[in-house]
């Protein structure tokens, strides 16, 4: 029997389960890649199939705590690590409107529809609306990365999702609180609670993220310890926010753990990583990428296992209503609030094609399932039948969005012409990668020869082979760039970023060797960081293509402009 | 003709406009001004250090890409002047073109960016406005024309 238990008992069984699930995930990953099938969707499908195995063969106990407190924090943390605050800030009005306003609209729109159409009482209906309004960007972002879409679209989708997870959780909690008989519900109180929970969570994350980024990552130069500290931060910020009330003597007060993790991740990604060595950055990125892969695999496999597909027909009407409700409410959110945003921030309009992707890419996943599973704790108030119905509706919606929307979103992105990574750009990358690899191989052979490991005649022959290969590849690259000269701009940006990072590393080395003072290091590092931020600005500016400016301020530049 | 102004965004699509400017400038031996316009609203809320870095990086990138293009055209010693200015596109281009007394303005077409605000027809409209306002020749450079030319 395989069992995954959050309680910690049955350690050996849990270990065996973990190993089996990881092995299944690895096989699915290989098969999905070979079949060019979306990995996350494949995991859910395999999970659904595994549930048909004889009873007792795989016995999974997935709790809300396992998903929300163990699996979700690392996913959120990794998701925020690579988000540029500068880009995020530029679209913060849109992201906030979609995440806060959108989740409120979604909660009430979906809640209203399921209340009127399938007679679910108001409070649990709103709670369902809230839990199902949390979008999960994992599957969509995977497509974005593989086919290359505008970074702005990625920020909009990821940003909305990261923030609306927290907002959904808060509305869900407030709605369930209102479901308790004898509880008087006041909009003003709910709004006050919302502000405390949301901003309290953000404050916890910002403070913890700042402490780790400035006090630890800056002053420590040990990539292993620094990585361990970020792990503690991801889980610690979640727990501290959730249990904040206990610590300060108000056990009923909870802050948003999800928003705390998001804020902490943004701090580390934008402040902490600037203060670390390249080795630490590489270790951190690799570690979090790996952890994200493992946790994502677990989440989607467990989703498949948890969705009782055989029970779904018993609530077929409710599931259909729920699916229609989320599709309709998403229309209101994306296009309605998108229109409103256009009035608020006309200089950063969200293009129509982006809205189509944001609408159809609003998949639901781990947060929705985690919150639905947590409903069991409210069975005494809601009743077992309603809890079961809401859970099945959630599973139905998650399954629909992952399979139907998840399998068609790539086609939509391509159809809308949003796949920016052209074949020419991919060819360029491929040729450059070959050149890079051949040169590394040639250097390695030279080292082996220099150290007396490789016999001279043999080295000469092998070196000549690589030299020819490098010449051919260089010629291919030259021809390719002549045919696609516009690719030079991307090549320039990549090289310039690399060069600036090398400058920063050289400064840190100089400081370590005592050649420059801490003060000079800080001053010059800030200068290099400003130039890196400038390149990020230029990249997003070129993407944005905002050729119409609304303000007419002018500032001439006296740069040396004449070529020699 | 007293000079050529290339109004550039600095993105991949600018290659063709820059190249056309270099070709005309070297062929007729007239000054070339590569003008990069940064929209004020996306720039204003940055601190001074970042603003300075952006202006410098914009100028450096243009210098590197223009030198590379000049070399590709067999004119490695081509002369050009780079200006980075912040503000409204229409106002900046008009003022700068008048300031240097240019007789020819080159505009690029927006690359197929999903979120480009100006469509091809809007660029044509803008070109008409400049032509009427400044009384100079305004050309829209399209990628295919530049590669074949």
Image: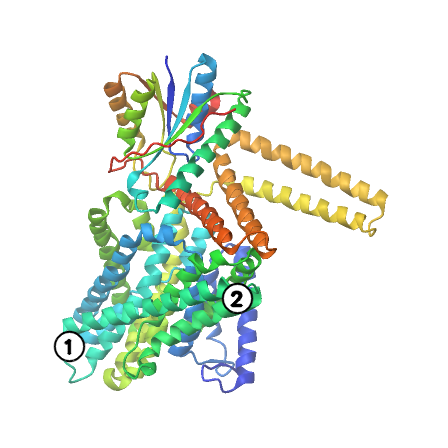
Question: Which chain contains the residue that carries disc 2?
Answer: A
**Residue A131, quarter of picture:** bottom left
The vertical placement of A85 against A311, above or below, is: above
- x and y percentages locating residue A277 in the rendered image: 55, 57
Q: Secondary structure at mark 2?
A: helix
Pointer 2 local density, CA inside 10 Å: few below 14, some 14–19, many at least 20: many
Q: Earlier in the sequence, mark 1 or mark 2?
A: 1
Q: Secondary structure at mark 1?
A: loop
The vertical placement of B77 against A266, above or below, is: above
Q: In the picture, which quadrant includes the N terminus of chain B?
A: top left
Pointer 1 local density, CA inside 10 Å: few below 14, some 14–19, many at least 20: some
- x and y percentages locating residue B2 in the rendered image: 37, 14
**Residue A241, quarter of picture:** bottom left
Question: Which chain contains the residue that carries disc 1?
Answer: A
Residue at 82%, 49% (x, y): give it: A454
For the question of whether residue A340 can be seen, the reply is: yes
* Lateral position of residue A50 relative to residue A454, left or right: left
The vertical placement of A523 against B16, above or below, is: below
- In three-dimensional space, the C-alpha distance between marks 1 and 2, rounded to whole angstroms, equals 46 Å
The residue under label 1 is A185
**Residue A396, quarter of picture:** bottom left
- x and y percentages locating residue A482 in the rendered image: 54, 29
- x and y percentages locating residue A456 in the rendered image: 84, 44
**Pointer 1 with pointer 2, Cβ within 8 A:** no
Residue at 41%, 70% (x, y): give it: A72
Foreground pick, B56 / A447 = B56
The residue under label 2 is A226
Front of the two marks 1 and 2: 2
* Lateral position of residue A102 relative to residue B22, left or right: left
Foreground pick, A455 / B134 = B134
């Amino acid at each position: 029997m395989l069992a995954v238990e959050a309680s910690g008992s049955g350690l050996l069984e849990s270990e065996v389960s973990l190993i089996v699930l990881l092995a299944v995930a690895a096989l699915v990953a290989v098969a999905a890649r070979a079949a060019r099938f979306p990995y996350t969707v494949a995991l859910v499908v395999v999970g659904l199939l595994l549930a048909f195995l004889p009873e007792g063969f795989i016995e999974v106990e997935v709790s809300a705590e396992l998903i929300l407190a163990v699996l979700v924090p690392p996913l959120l943390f990794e998701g925020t690590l690579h988000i540029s605050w500068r880009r995020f800030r530029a679209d913060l009005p849109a992201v906030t409107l979609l995440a806060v306003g959108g989740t409120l609209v979604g909660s009430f729109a979906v809640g209203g529809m399921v209340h009127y159409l399938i007679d679910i009482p108001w409070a649990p209906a709103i709670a369902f609306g809230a839990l199902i309004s949390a979008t999960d960007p994992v599957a969509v972002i995977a497509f974005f990365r593989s086919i290359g879409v505008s970074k702005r679209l990625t920020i909009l989708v990821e940003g909305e999702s990261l923030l609306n997870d927290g907002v959904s959780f808060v509305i869900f909690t407030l709605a369930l609180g209102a479901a308790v008989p004898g509880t008087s519900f006041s909009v003003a109180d709910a709004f006050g609670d919302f502000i405390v929970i949301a901003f309290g969570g953000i404050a916890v994350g910002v403070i913890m993220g700042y402490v780790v980024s400035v006090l630890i990552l800056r002053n420590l130069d040990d990539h292993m310890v620094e990585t361990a500290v970020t792990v503690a931060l991801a889980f610690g910020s979640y727990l501290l926010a959730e249990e904040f009330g206990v610590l300060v003597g108000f056990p009923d007060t909870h802050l948003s753990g999800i928003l705390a993790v998001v804020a902490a991740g943004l701090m580390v990604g934008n402040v902490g990583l600037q203060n670390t060595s390249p080795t630490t950055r590489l270790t951190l990125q690799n570690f979090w990428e790996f952890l994200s892969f493992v946790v994502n695999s677990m989440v989607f496999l467990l989703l498949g296992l948890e969705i009782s597909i055989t029970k779904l027909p018993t609530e077929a009407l409710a599931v259909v209503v729920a699916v229609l409700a989320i599709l309709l409410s998403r229309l209101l959110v994306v296009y309605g609030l998108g229109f409103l945003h256009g009035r608020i921030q006309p200089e950063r309009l969200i293009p129509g094609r982006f809205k189509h992707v944001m609408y159809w890419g609003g998949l639901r996943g781990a947060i929705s399932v985690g919150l639905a599973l947590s409903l069991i704790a409210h069975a005494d108030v809601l009743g077992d039948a309603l809890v079961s119905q809401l859970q099945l509706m959630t599973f139905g919606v998650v399954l629909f969005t992952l399979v139907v929307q998840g399998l068609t979103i790539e086609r939509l992105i391509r159809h809308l012409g949003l796949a920016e990574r052209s074949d020419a750009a991919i060819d360029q990358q491929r040729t450059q990668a070959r050149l890079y690899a051949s040169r590394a191989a040639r250097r390695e052979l030279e080292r082996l020869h220099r150290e007396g490991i490789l016999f001279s005649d043999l080295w000469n022959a092998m070196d000549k082979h690589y030299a020819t290969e490098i010449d051919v590849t260089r010629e291919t690259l030259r021809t390719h760039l002549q045919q696609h000269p516009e690719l030079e701009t991307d090549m320039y940006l990549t090289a310039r970023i690399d060069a600036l990072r090398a400058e920063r590393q050289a400064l840190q080395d100089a400081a370590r060797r005592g050649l420059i003072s801490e003060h000079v290091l800080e001053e010059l590092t800030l200068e290099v960081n400003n130039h890196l931020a400038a390149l990020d600005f230029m990249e997003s500016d070129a993407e944005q293509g905002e050729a119409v400016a609304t303000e007419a301020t002018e500032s001439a530049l006296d740069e040396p402009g004449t070529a020699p | 003709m007293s000079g050529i102004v290339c109004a550039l965004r600095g993105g991949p699509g600018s290659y063709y406009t820059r190249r056309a400017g270099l070709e005309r400038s070297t062929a007729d031996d007239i000054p070339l001004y590569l003008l990069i316009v940064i929209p004020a609203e996306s720039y204003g809320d940055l601190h001074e250090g970042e603003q300075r870095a952006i202006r410098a990086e914009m100028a450096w990138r243009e210098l590197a890409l223009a030198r590379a293009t000049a070399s590709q055209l067999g004119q490695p010693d081509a002369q050009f002047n780079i200006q980075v200015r912040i503000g409204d596109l229409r106002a900046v281009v008009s003022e700068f073109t008048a300031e240097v007394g240019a007789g020819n303005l080159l505009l690029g077409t927006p690359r197929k960016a999903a979120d480009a605000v100006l469509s091809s027809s809007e660029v044509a409209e803008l070109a008409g406005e400049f032509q009427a306002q400044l009384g100079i020749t305004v050309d829209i450079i399209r990628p295919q024309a530049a590669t074949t030319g």
